[in-house]
Amino acid sequence: MKNITILITKGAILGNIEGPRQVFEEVNNIMGRMGKPFLFKVQLAGLSSESHLNDGLYAISTIPINKIKKSDLIIIPAMYGDLKTAVQQNQEFIPWIIEQFKEGTEIASLCLGAFLLASTGLLNGRKCATHWIAANDFRRMFPDINLVEDKIITDEGGIYSSGGAYSSLNLILYLVEKFVGRETAVLCSKAFQIDIQRDSQSPFTIFIGQREHEDEDIKKAQEFIENNFQHKITVDRLTEVLALSRRNLERRFKKATSNTIVEYIQRVKIEAAKKSLEVSRKSINEVMFDVGYSDTKAFRNVFKKITGLSPVQYRNKYTHIVSV
């Protein structure tokens, strides 16, 4: 039997606690119906014998972490509010998480729980996923970690992370499949109606340009791109506008925004195209021309690279109205 410890951190999001607990308990129910022994023991752990969530709205009985000798898997849920503050409020968990990992315990962060996991230093040099909405903050706080913004699941030698919000349950299904098998994971996906095939959060991502930096020239470059995305924009044109050398501009742009200039231009154009596909009746070609592309194949390839979907698939996903 595997011991699963779900941490009740300060500011934890209830759904990231109850969702995983229910999935692991469902595995036990499946085993029970087959006349087999339970596979998971799920325990909720905090800094004391009682933890509070949502400013005291919920009280949860917890096992103090100093009374837990060994877990097979620790789950760190997402936290709400200012993430720097949330990490500071949960500093007492960090030495214990590190010690457990050294003893062979696996660690999984869900959504914004990646910020607390990253604070342990265990992710340095490794890949990590988190909610796309916090990608810029994550890169700024943890530059030594390889954030894979589009991924829903990462598996880095016993350290796991997941994409945002309810996509965290895809990581839980992944762990069920890894620990128990594909058949049981499929049964759980059907019971909870979780799309087991999802591996990317790209279709849900809204591009937010990194603006929290101090390089005024790069801010001007960003503004120029965002105000002129309808036209063809080249790196050479930006060097003329800003009176900077190409090498200097490219180096500073990447440092400030975590994107190359070409990547930034593409993301701004595709974000505009996405909005048009969601709300307008324009054809795909009309949308393509509106955002400054003239080559259908190039537009389709860039669109799919960024969103994981073709323009047609994206439109169908976000404009279809279900009849009742």
Image (cartoon, rainbow, N blue to C red):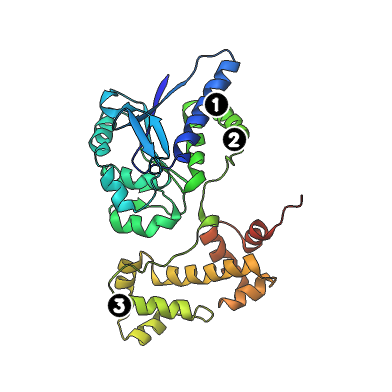
User: Mark 1–mark 2 contact, CB under 8 Å?
Assistant: yes
Read off the residue under disc 1: 26
Type of the residue with mark 3 = Glu
Which quadrant holds residue 300? bottom right
Residue 322 showing in the rendered view: yes
Which quadrant holds residue 76? top left
Earlier sequence position, callout 1 versus callout 2: 1
Read off the residue under disc 3: 216
Q: Position of residue 195 (x, y in %)?
A: 59, 42
Residue 143 showing in the rendered view: no
Earlier sequence position, callout 3 versus callout 1: 1
Above or below residue 7? Residue 39 is: above
| Picture quarter with the N terminus | top left
- State the SS at label 2: helix
Earlier sequence position, callout 2 versus callout 3: 2
Distance between mark 1 and mark 2 Cα atoms = 10 Å
